[in-house]
Image (cartoon, rainbow, N blue to C red):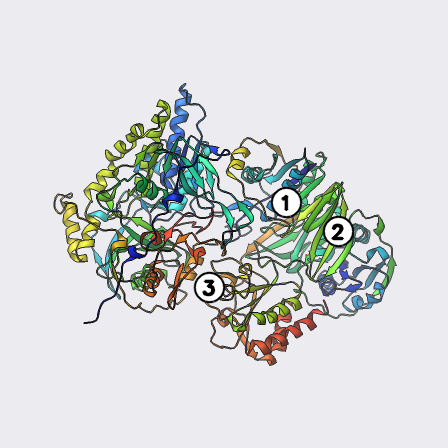
Amino acid sequence: MKIAVCVKRVPDMDVRFRIAADNASVDEAGLKFDLNDFDAWGVEAALKLRDANAGSEVTVISLGPDVVQETIRKALSMGADKGIQLKADKVPFDGLAIAKALAEELKSGAYDLIFFGKMSPDSANGVVGQMVAELLGLACVSAISSLEIANGKGKAKRELEGAQEIVEFPLPAVLTVDEGLNQARLPSLKGIMAAKKKPLVVKAAQLPQSQLTVRKVELPPERQAGRIVGEGAAAVPELVKLLQTEAKVL
Amino acid sequence: MPNVFAFVETRGGEIRKVGLEAVTAARMLADKLGGGEVHALLMGPSGVAAKAPQIGEHGADLVIVVENAGLANYNPEAATATAADRIKSGGYRAAVFSTTAQGRDLAPRVAARLGVALVTDVLSFDVDGDAIVVKHPMNIGKVIATIAINSQPAIIAMRPNVIAPAKNPKAGRVESAQPAADPAASRVKVVETRQGSGGKLDLAEAPVVVAGGRGLKAAENFKLVEDLAAAFGNAAVGATRAVTDDGWRPHSDQIGQTGRLVSPELYVAVGISGAVQHLAGMRTSRTIVAVNRDKDAPIFKVADYGIVGDVFEVIPALTEAVREAKKHH
Amino acid sequence: MPRELKVLPSAHQAPLPLDKLILTEPPDAEAVPMDVLFVGGGPAGLAGAIALARLVKADNEAGGDLGDIQIGVLEKAGALGEHSLSGAVVNPIAIRALFPELKDGDFPFRAPVAGERVYFMTESRAIRMPTPPTMQNHGYYIGSICEIVRWLGEKAEGLGVNIFTGFPAASLLTEGQRVTGVRTTPSGLSRTGEQGSGYTPPTDITAQITVLAEGTRGTLSQAYMQWQKIASDNPQIFALGVKEVWETLKPLDAVVHTLGWPLPKDCFGGSFMYPLTRNLVALGLVVGLDYKRTTDDVHEMLQRMKLNPLFRDILESGEMVEWGAKTIPEGGYYALPKRRHGDGLMIVGDSAGFVEVASLKGIHYAMQSGMFAARAAFDALKRKDTSAATLREYDTMVDGSFIVEDLRRRRNMRLAFQKSGFYTAGLKAGIMTVTGGALFGGKIESHQDADVAREVKPPTPFTPDGKLTFSKLDAVFKSGNATRDDIPSHLLVGPDITADVAELYTHMCPAGVYERDGERLVVSPANCVDCKATDVIGPRWTPREGGSGPKYRQM
C-alpha cells in the first residue's frame, strides 16, 4: 500500500499568546512548535497499516518554510519512510490554497490512502483534508475515531453530537483523523537516529492566491465576575435560561 | 439584492436546532446585505418535506426540499453535489452551514467544489463594503481572528449556539428537487447512525464536562453526575482528586492536579469545593457552573453561575431541565 | 523544661538504590552506539558536545583519522531548557572561549548588568548596603538559562550533535570498573507499574566515553562516586532556590540582591531580583537546606518576601508568568570530589559541585568544565584510550583553571554560616574576601544537610492572596508541569515516617509533592519539578519517564 500523511507544524497551545506588532498575527517569539497531535494520530494510523501490509510505504508531506523539516523528521522518527517539504514562505490561513498545493503534489502519487488530522488547533478550521479529497475526486471520510481496512475497502466510525456514524468506503480514500483513533507512538532513540538517513525532498509549493485575509487578531475579552443565580432546585430554570441565552452553551 | 443560501442540517428526518440557527443567520446576513432572499436546502428521507414550514417561519423565502430514501442517513456525496449545484446555479452572495460533525464534513467539500474559501466555527459576521467579515476563534479560543472573505459566494459555517433561532416568517415557498447525485451511487456509505455516545468522550476533548466531588458523599451517588452528563449528550464525566484517590472513580477521570488542561465550553462542578488542586485544571473552561451547599465554597469565585443548594435536589432538577432543552436539538 | 522534639532527616532516608543505578549486565543487543555521550542537556553537557564536535571537525578537515564520531546528548526534559533554572547573571568568559568567532552581542543574553544594589531587609524595610566584593557583577550579563540552553542546543545540532530529548538516563552500564554507557527509563507505566498502551521499554546506549552533566544532585553522579568510593574533604551541601518570573508594569533598572528577612537568622541565603527586560523580572530566594526547623518553608518565605515594599512596589499589578525551583550545590572547594573521572567516564558542571555560592555563579564553570571534558575526550579518542589514566587530563585541566582557583579563594564562605551566626559569619566572609582566604581559610568541617537535626515547630500560618502570593499548587501550575497524574512514583520513601517527618517533607518541597494528612504522608509525585531538595533531606529522587516535570521557558 502507498500511504501519504499530510502534517502541520503547530505551536504548543499551553501558553498565553501575545499579539504581534502588526495586530494581524500571533507573536511567535518564545513559542514551542511540534507536530500537530491530530496529524500524529494520522501518522500512527499509517504506520500501523504499513506494518500490517508487507511492501507498503508511508510518505509524510508538509507545506511551509524550512522549519517544517523538523516536523517531517519527527514523523520519520516515528517510522515514516520518506518526507516531502512543499516549500512556501508562510502557511496561509486559507485552507483551499493549502489544499490546492497539497493536491498538486498528491495527485501523481497513486496513494491508496491519504491521512490528514481532523484539524489543527492554531487556524482551527478543519477543512484541508476534505478539500483535498474533493480536488482529487477521492472518497473521503472525516473525523474518524476507529478504522478497519481490508481487501481494498474500509470501515470507520465518526463521532457526532450524541451519536455515531458507521461509514463504509472504498480505497483509494482520504481520511481525516480524530482523537481516539489511536495513541501516537513516541519516537524511539533508534528511530531518531534512523530518521536522519531517510530521504526528505524539498520542492516548491504551487500555492495559489488566498481568498481570505486575516485583518486582525486579538485576545478575547476578560472573564467577567460570576454570580450566584439562586438557591436550591428553584434556581434551575433561571440557570438553564442563562446557559441558553447568555452563555449560549445550551 | 444579493441572496443568501442556508443548509438546514437534519438527523433522522428531523430538523436539528443548528439547522434553524443557519436559517436565522442567513436571514440576518441577507438583511445586512440589503434585504435579499434566503433560500434554504432541506435534504432527508420521505416525509422531511413536512418540516419545511418551520424553515419559512425562521426567515426562508424559498425552501428547496430534496426527499430521497437514500438520504435517511447523511450522504456526503449527494449532499455535496446538491448543495454545490444549487449554490452555483443560484448566484448566491453567501452560503451558511453549521459547524457540526456533519457540517465540518460537508462545507469544505462544497467550498472546494466551488473553488471558494470557507471559514468554519464562525462567531459573528458583518458586511464591510464588498467583503463579508467574520470572527473565528484560533489557538483553542485563546485568540480571536477577524477574517475578510474575498471570494463569492462567501461560505461560512456557524458555531452552534451563537445565533439563537429566531422566528421571522417569510414566504417559505417550497420547491421540490432531486439530489444532484444519486445517493445510492455514493462511494462513501453511512450504514448506520447510532444514538448515544458509544465510546466515552475524552475529558480533554469533550465540549461539556460534568465533574463531581466530595459533596456527593458516596461513590454510588456519582450516578447523578452521569445522568446529567448523559442529558447533555456530548459531555464527559470528571472527578476531583479526592474522589479518585478514594476509589470512587478511576484515575483517568481525575481533573487537574498538576495542570492537566481541561477546557470545555461548559464545565459543571457538582459538590466540588474548588480547592486549588482542582481549579488549576479547569479554570480556562469557557463557562463554569457550580452547585454546592456551601455559599462560601471557593468554587463560586471562579464560577460564572452558581447555585447554592443540596446537590441531591438541584442536580436531578437540572438534569430534567437539560433533557427538555435538548429535545429541540 | 519542655522536651524539644527534633527530626533527623537522615534517619528517615532510603539509601541510594545502587543495584538499580549501576548495572553490570551487558548492554542489550539492540543498543544504540554512540562514541561520546553527554548525560544532561544543560550548559555543561551542551558546551561539551559543541566543543568536542568542533575539535573532531577541525581534526577531520586537517586530514585526521577520527572519521564519523557520534556525539549524543541525553536530556530528560521533553525539550531543551525545560528543566533548566538559574538566576541568572552570567560571566561570559566560557561562552566567549567556546565561540571565539562571535561577539558578545551574538550571545543569548538579555542585557549587560547596568546597576547593582544590595539590601538588608526587615519585614517592612529594605536598607541599602554597600555591595560586597563577592556580589559585584560588572561586565556580566543578565540572562535566562533556558534561552542560553536552547541557543546552545541549536549550535550543537548545527554541528551534527545528536540531541535526544525526553530520554532520562536511569542507570549506568558498566563492565568491570569501566562505564560503557547508560540505560534510559521506560515510559508509559501506570501508577501500579503495569505497562499501559503507550509503553516504551528502556533503551541502552553504549559509548566509549560517558560524561555525566546531570546538574545539581545528579543521581548517576552520586551513584558513580559511591560505587567508586570517591570521597571529598567535606560532604556536598545544598541550598534550595525558588524562583519566579513576573511581567511588571513598573520597570526595574538594576540587579538586586538582599540579605536578612524573611530568612531566620540561622538560615543561610538571600534573594535576587534581575531585570530580563525593563518589564520582565526574575526573582528568587535561595536558602540553605540545613535550616533548623521542620516547618521552615522556602516557597512560603519567598511569598512573604514579596510583601516587602522593595519587591511589592515592582510586582504589584504585574503578573507572575512562571515559577520554578532547583537546588544549588554549595559545598564549594572542600566538597569537590577528589576524582571526577574514571574508565570511560567524566563528571562535569553542578554534578561535580562547580558552583561558587557567594557570587551565585555556576553557569560559566559548567560550560568550561564541559569544554575541558571535550578536550580530554578528544585526546582519548585520538589515542584510542579512554581509560581513567588518559581521562585524568580532564581533572588536571579543571584543577589548573579559574574554576578551582575561584572556588579555592572563596572556600569557607558558606561553611562559616553553618558554624557561626549570620552576622559573625558575614563578618568572617568579608574578611575572607579581603584577605583572599588567608584569614579564616582553614578548612571548616561540615556535615551533610540530612544530618542536621531540625526542631519540631508549628508552622507559621500562610494564606496566599492569589495575586502577589501563591500557594504551592498554583505555583506548580505556573511551572508548566503537566505530568500525567497516574505516573508511578519515582520517589523512594524511607523508614519510620512519623507525622513530624511528614510535616518536614510538606514544608521542604516547594512543589507540594508531600502533604501531611493527619498522621500519614500523602505523596503526589506528578507535582515534582525535579529540584532535588527531596533527594537531599527527604525521600530519594530517581529518574522517571521522559518529559515529566516542569516546562520552564524563561527561567
Chain under numbered label 3: B
Where residue A25 appears, as percent x and y from the top left, is 55, 50
Q: Residues within 10 Å of mark 1 (few under 14, many from 20)?
A: many
Is A132 above or below relative to B164? above
| Distance from Cα at disc 2 to Cα at disc 3 | 42 Å
Can the viewer see residue B6?
A: yes
Q: Which mark is residue A42?
A: 1
Q: Residues within 10 Å of mark 3 (few under 14, many from 20)?
A: many
Q: Say which amino acid is labelled 1.
A: Gly
Where residue B169 appears, as percent x and y from the top left, is 78, 70
| Distance from Cα at disc 3 to Cα at disc 1 | 34 Å
The residue labelled by disc 3 is B277
Residue, x 66% and y 55% (percent of image)?
A: B120
* Tag 2 near tag 1, CB within 8 Å: no
Residue, x 61% and y 40% (percent of image)?
A: A63
Query: SS for tag 1?
Result: helix
Q: Which mark is residue A167?
A: 2
Is C287 above or below relative to C464? above
* Tag 3 near tag 1, CB within 8 Å: no
Quarter of the image for the N terminus of chain A: give it. Answer: top right
Mark closer to the chain start, 2 or 1: 1
Is A150 above or below relative to C417? above
* Quadrant of the image occupied by residue C461: bottom left
Residue, x 33% and y 29% (percent of image)?
A: C387
